C-alpha cells in the first residue's frame, strides 16, 4: 500500500511542478493533466474514459440485472430476487463486464497493476449514490491458499482506493475465506452455492455495523450470497453489495 501512496504523491508533485504530459495508465498515450474530465483521478486519457461507459437504464435494485429497454414499466426487482431475495439490501454496480472495463479488471487481477485500482475506483462514485454510507468497506476475500499463491487480493486494492476517496475505513479482517474451494468457474450456479457454503468466516466485530461488501465482478451472485450470509450471521446491521462490473448473464440463465 505504501508504494502506491508514494506513487500517487509523486504524481501530484510532478503535476504541481508542471513536469510535462502524463501517460494514460491503460493505453500509454500522452495526455495533458487537467484536460480530461477529472474522473479516474487523471490517470486515464479521455479516449479510454469514453470506452468505460456506466450501465444505463432500469435495473434490479438488488442484483443490477438490466431490464430490457422494451419493458413498459421496469419492476424494482427481477424475478430471481423476488423468488429468492439476496442477503444484502441494495446493490451498486458500475458497468458491464466487457470491453475496456473487462481488460482493466483482468490486468489488475492477474498482473497486479495496483494503480489501475486508483483509476477504477473513481468510476464507482456516481453508482454509489444509491446507497447509504456504511461504517466500513469489506473486500471480498480470496481463499487463503490462492491469496498466498497470488500475493495480493485485487478486490482489496479496489476497496482501499474506494475507501481512500470516500474516507471510509476498509476492514478486510471482518471476512475471511480459509478453505480452498474448487475454482468457481468450473461449476454451475447451484453447485457454486453448495461449494461455497460455510467457506466464509465473519468476525464477531462485524456485529452492528453497516457494511459495503465490495467485489470486482458479479456473475451469478453465489459468492456474494455466501459472503453476505456469513456477515449477517455475525450480526452485521446492514449489508450492501458494490461491484465494478456485472456479467450480462441473468442468474436465471445459469
Ligand atoms: Zn488511454
Ligand atoms: Zn435481481
Image (cartoon, rainbow, N blue to C red):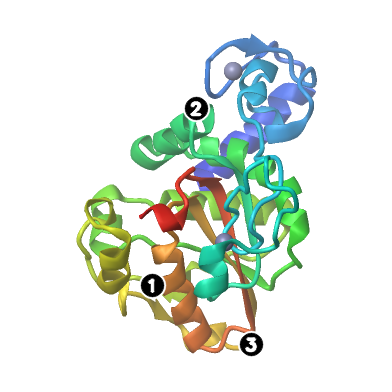
* Residue at position x 35%, y 55% in the image: 254
Q: Position of residue 189 (x, y in %)?
A: 32, 61
Answer left or right for 40 relative to 215.
right
Query: Which residue lies at the image location 73% right of the left edge and 63% below the top edge?
Result: 131
Question: Quick check: 4 above or below 239?
Answer: above
Q: What is the x, y in percent for residue 39?
A: 74, 33
How packed mark 1 is, by other alpha carbons closer than 10 Å (few <14, some 14-19, many 20 or more), is: many
Residue designated by label 2: 99
Looking at this view, is 27 or 84 the one in front?
A: 84
Instruction: Give the vertical position of 235 relative to 28 (above or below).
Output: below
What residue would you read off at disc 3? 208
Along the viewing direction, whichever of 15 and 148 lies nearer the viewer: 148
Residue 213: horizontal and vertical position, in percent? 55, 65
- Give the crowd class for mark 3: few <14, some 14-19, many >=20 residues within 10 Å: some
Q: Specify which label sits upstream in the sequence, 1 or 2.
A: 2
- Please state which of residues 20 and 197 is positioned toward the viewer in this rendering: 197
Tell me how far mark 2 sits from mark 3, CA to CA: 39 Å
Residue 85 in sight: no
Label 2 CA crowd tier, 10 Å (few <14, some 14–19, many 20+): few
Ligand 2, image quadrant it occupies: bottom right
Residue linked to disc 1: 176
Task: Say whether disc 1 or disc 3 marks the residue closer to the N-terminus.
Answer: 1
* Mark 2 or 3: the one toward you: 2
Amino acid at each position: 500500500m505504501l508504494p502506491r501512496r508514494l506513487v500517487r504523491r509523486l504524481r501530484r508533485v510532478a503535476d504541481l511542478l508542471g513536469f510535462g504530459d502524463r501517460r494514460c495508465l491503460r493505453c500509454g498515450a500522452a495526455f495533458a493533466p487537467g484536460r480530461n474530465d477529472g474522473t479516474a483521478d487523471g490517470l486515464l486519457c479521455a479516449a479510454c474514459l469514453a470506452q468505460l461507459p456506466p450501465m444505463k437504464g432500469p435495473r434490479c435494485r438488488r442484483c443490477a440485472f438490466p431490464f430490457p429497454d422494451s419493458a413498459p414499466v421496469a419492476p424494482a426487482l427481477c424475478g430471481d430476487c423476488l423468488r429468492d431475495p439476496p442477503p444484502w439490501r441494495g446493490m451498486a454496480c458500475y458497468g458491464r463486464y466487457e470491453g475496456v472495463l473487462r481488460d482493466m479488471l483482468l490486468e489488475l487481477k492477474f498482473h497486479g497493476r495496483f494503480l489501475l485500482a486508483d483509476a477504477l475506483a473513481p468510476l464507482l462514485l456516481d453508482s454509489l449514490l444509491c446507497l447509504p454510507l456504511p461504517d466500513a468497506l469489506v473486500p471480498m476475500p480470496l481463499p487463503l491458499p490462492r491469496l498466498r499463491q497470488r500475493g495480493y487480493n485485487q478486490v482489496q486494492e479496489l476497496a482501499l482506493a474506494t475507501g481512500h476517496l470516500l474516507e471510509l475505513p476498509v476492514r478486510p479482517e471482518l471476512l475471511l475465506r480459509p478453505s480452498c474451494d474448487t475454482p468457481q468457474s468450473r461449476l454451475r450456479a447451484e453447485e457454486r452455492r453448495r461449494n461455497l457454503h460455510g467457506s466464509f468466516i465473519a468476525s464477531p466485530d462485524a456485529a452492528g455495523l453497516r457494511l459495503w461488501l465490495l467485489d470486482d465482478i458479479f456473475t451469478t451472485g453465489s459468492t456474494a450470497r455466501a459472503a453476505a450470509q456469513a456477515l449477517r450471521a455475525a450480526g452485521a446491521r446492514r449489508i450492501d453489495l458494490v461491484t465494478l462490473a456485472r456479467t450480462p448473464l441473468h442468474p436465471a440463465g445459469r
